[in-house]
Amino acid sequence: MKKLALHWQILIALVLSILFGIFLGDYVVYVAWMGKLFINALKMVIVPLILSSIISGVANIGGAESFGRLGLKTLGYYLLTSLLAILTGLVLVNLIQPGVGIDLGLTQNVKGLSAARQSFGDTLLRIIPPNIFKAFSSGNMLGIIFFAMIFGYFITKVPAQKQELLTNFFDAVFEAMMKITMFIIKFSPLGIFGLVAKVIAEQASRGNLADVFSSLGLYMLTVIAGLIIHAFITLPALLKFVGKINPIKHAKAMLTPLLTAFSTSSSSATLPLTMQAVENNDGVSNKISSFVLPLGATVNMDGTALYELVAAMFIAQAYGMDIPFLQQFLMVFAALLASIGAAGIPMAGFVMITVILSVIGLPLEAVGLILAVDRILDMMRTTVNVWSDSVCTVIIAKSEGEKLKVE
């Protein structure tokens, strides 16, 4: 009997987990551990995988000219797509106005708000960690990426014999980490089943799903509409007209990491699968993917940027505030910076909304208004984040003259 492809296994696990969460929510404790174990396993490989992949990638890129060109292309793309996503959200939230007349009775207390104001202010300082080993243990991805890029670049500056030794070593470490990652990925259907079943059961246990969705339904539709426009129109248009790549072929190549991103709500946890998909299915070289994707999982958050702006505007409308155009422009800028400051972990973007709320003078506790539906939207915006990272990778690979399987 032919074995089901991994993306079909994940799809079946998603459907079963939703049914389990709704009808057997009381027993979710018996399956939730699988999700936790799966996430732990992915987190275990993230730091060594990113470190080895970036060092290997940068060392293989070559001199300063190639490194600088690739970096400028990548950052330019990330800023462009995030800005396009934010502007899409801004247009929709002004047209639909989901917050007008909303009942504020859903407000809840949110943990982590006291640190939210400093989290963005410290972002630039975190890029250069005072202790790299502490950055490894705490998962400071910006610091790890910066160190790996610098280390990889200066490998090209040592004598040829040592350069070859170091390059071969980190190539081998990266290859070993990918083998471990592929082993973990085999268990993704079970992990995703445990993760999604837990989320659904928690939502259903509150017993007021209908009330929540009716009150926040228009807000959810606004966010979802923006994500759909960005994912199905803006990004495929970039693929087709800028990269000369077939969007449908690329979407098929990315099916497994996209389903995993939806289930885990973590672009960082999905990174190993994304790297495997763009290299094996799209035909992108490791030199490109190992540089572009880890950077994207940390700083490129199109879906999060769109969501943050719509959420902040929704809260402002719910408080009866009329936001002038100039202030909306400042919110766009704040959303762009906040999306860069948001880590690739579940609900990070939710906390980072407080940066935008600070710009327009609303209380930080106002984010509690949208807490009830955040987890569902988190799954969707993470999928868009990962999709955008993959689109960037294939476009840059094509611009560097690589021959891809999805042209």
Image (spheres, helix red, strand yellow):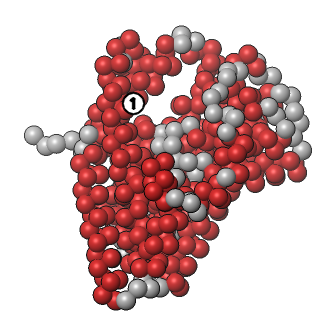
* Residue placed most toward the observer, 71 or 329: 71
Q: Residue at x 65, y 59 (%)?
A: 124
**Disc 1 marks which amino acid?**
Leu
Report x, y in % for residue 116.
Answer: 68, 40
Quadrant of the rendering where the N terminus is positioned:
top left
Q: Quadrant of residue 98?
A: top right
Report x, y in % for residue 3.
Answer: 16, 42
Report which residue position mark 1 lands on. Answer: 195
Quadrant of the rendering where the C terminus is positioned:
bottom left
Taking 36 as reference, is 378 left or right?
right
* Residue placed most toward the observer, 119 or 32: 119
Number of labels in the image equals: 1
- Identity of the residue furthest to the bottom in this view: 160
Report x, y in % for residue 405.
Answer: 34, 67
Please indicate, yes or no, whether residue 206 appears anywhere in the rendered image: yes
Where 293 sits versus 378, above or below? Answer: below
Where 101 sits versus 154, above or below? Answer: above
Q: Residue at x 26, y 68 (%)?
A: 172
- Identity of the residue furthest to the left in this view: 1
Mark 1 residue crowding within 10 angstroms, few (<14) / some (14–19) / many (20+): many
Taking 59 as reference, is 297 left or right?
right
* Residue placed most toward the observer, 237 or 259: 259
Q: Residue at x 77, y 39 (%)?
A: 357
* Residue placed most toward the observer, 84 or 260: 260
Q: Residue at x 59, y 27 (%)?
A: 373
Please indicate, yes or no, whether residue 255 appears anywhere in the rendered image: no
Taking 316 as reference, is 233 left or right?
left
Local secondary structure at mark 1: helix
